Amino acid sequence: MDSNIIEQLLEKYWMAETSLEEEQQLRDFFQSKDVPESMKATAEMFRFFDSEKNKSLNENFESTVTKQLRQRQGGKVISMSFTNIARIAAGILVVVAAGYFIRQEVRKSYPQELQDTYSDPQMAFEETKKALMMISNSFGKARHEAGKMKVFNDAEKKIQNKDQEEKVTI
């Protein structure tokens, strides 16, 4: 078979795009004796696949493995008696009960719902207006103070410009 065709089939094989017939062509080619030197490793791989495909398990495989597992040393077998199970269950019960009681105490210390502080909606509106006016006045004062900061920043820029001009002239 032409080595170009084999190389194309191998490319398809490595990309998992070959059909069963194309894979059989590759197997047949690599079983032959006249394989190019550049493809010897691939031929060995295909021969290995064929030899492994023909292997099977012997009749007493399962019993042999089971017997070896039972004879294996080094593993630790834990037997759970009723006493150990009862201890574990009691520990879990204590943790769950403690969680429940802590939750109940937390619920008692925090009110479930927030209550209105004003029964008259008009009065609540007036108080809200007052609070917002206080915030607005604070922002106005802050803006006025920020204006003062701008004057200082402008003065600092002028001083820096004069210093740079003096350095250039020197």
Image (tube, grey):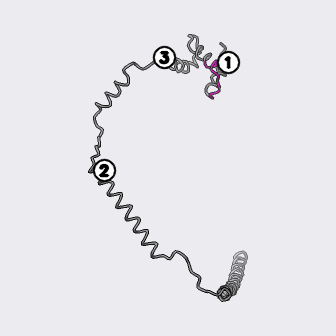
Magenta segment: 15-23
Q: Is residue 106 magenta?
A: no
Q: Place residue 108 in its image quadrant.
A: bottom left
Q: CA distance from mark 2 to mark 3?
A: 50 Å
**Residue type of the residue flagged with mark 3:** Asn
Along the line of sight, the residue nearer the viewer: 84 or 26: 84
Q: Place residue 67 in its image quadrant.
A: top left
The residue carrying mark 2 is 85
**Residue type of the residue flagged with mark 2:** Ile
Q: Earlier in the sequence, mark 2 or mark 3?
A: 3
Q: Is residue 19 magenta?
A: yes
Residue in view at x 60 percent, y 17 percent: 24
Residue in view at x 36 percent, y 57 percent: 92
Dot 1: element: helix
Label 3: few (<14), some (14–19) or many (≥20) C-alpha neighbours in 10 Å? few
Dot 3: element: loop
Q: Which mark is residue 54?
A: 3
Q: Nearer the viewer, mark 2 or mark 3?
A: 2
Q: Nearer the viewer, mark 2 or mark 1?
A: 2
